[in-house]
Amino acid sequence: MEKKTIPVFQKKKIRFSDTVATKNALRKLGLHSVCEESRCPNIGECFKNKTATFLILGDVCTRNCAFCCIKKGLPCPPDTEEPSRVLEAVRELGIEHVVITSVTRDDLPDGGAGFFGTTIKMIREAFPDKRIEVLVPDFMGKESSIRIVSDSLPDIFSHNVETVPSLYRAVRSKADYRRSLGVLELVKKLNRKQLTKSGLMLGLGEKMDEVVSTMRDIASAGCDFLSIGQYLAPGKKNHNISFHASEEDFEYLKLKGREMGFTHVESGRYVRSSYNAKRYIHPRKDSAQAL
Ligand code: SF4
């Protein structure tokens, strides 16, 4: 992979007026989005299309991943009204494929799993035809928490492995590679029809053979979908970008992923796990709801 001098943060051009409706809806309802909090480069495009990834359980994270710019510290107790406000935003924005993620809440006994479950159920009851995807933290590998979310039957259960095992200490110091794979494995064990998804970033310092080996581990965990994107440091204090992957790198990994058995792989510079999330799943009958 080619090494270049790297600008700290790059994003697609945003026309402010395109994003106003989505931003206003989030503000009015007092909701956070990972789009804004993580300074996602796709925010202009996604907000223009009236879609956003909801960040529930507050905007303060109990972990300190080096690639992430979300606030770190001791969060406030969760807001019990939040699930109904997410539902209201889904209604107001007319989102068809709802993606919900959260900060990591190691301070809560269930890691916030109950809030995921409540939010999924509320949306499902109000809008049975909407697709719901959750991107969850590792819940410290607790089966009881993973089961709470799994039992709520999201259409896609996603947990990002993010990077190769050799970089965990540097960029995900409070996470554990095997624990993350274990989350994906357990979800399939609990419900073999549950569609699962994971994501990786390139440019944190990994080697290509490590990426391929990590993809194999994720495939072996039974994961259906994979996203691969370029890491773009969201701030000056974040982990440095080690390289920019080429179009050929992304294409190569996409083909490799298909060979490994992933049913859908999105691979490209601006790919994020929630970017164009509805592309991964089409026929409703494939979802966990078909059980
Ligand atoms: S890619 Fe995901 S996180 Fe980024 S702006 Fe779009 S919905 Fe938000």
Image: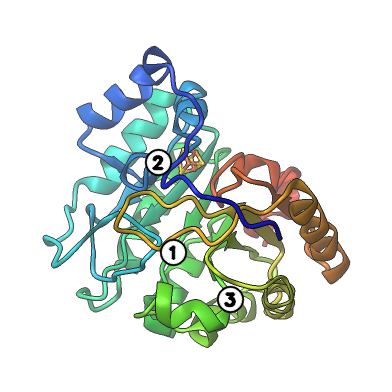
Do the residues under discs 2 and 3 have CB atoms within 8 angstroms? no
Residue type marked 2: Cys
Which is more toward the observer, 156 or 221? 221
How far is disc 2 from disc 3 in space, using C-alphas? 24 Å
Can you give x and y, in whole percent of width and height, for residue 248 in the image? 80, 51
Residue at point 41%, 33% (across, down): 90
- Residue at x-position 64% and y-position 59%: 288
Nearest to N terminus: mark 2 or mark 3: 2
Q: Nearer the viewer, residue 189 or 264?
A: 264
24 or 252, which is in the foreground?
252
Q: Residue at x 53, y 50 (%)?
A: 5
Is label 2 in contact with label 1 (beta carbons under 8 Å)? no
Q: Earlier in the sequence, mark 2 or mark 1?
A: 2
Corner quadrant of residue 16: top left
Q: SS for tag 1?
A: loop
Find disc 2 in the rendering and name its residue: 35
Question: Taking 112 as reference, is 35 above or below it?
Answer: above
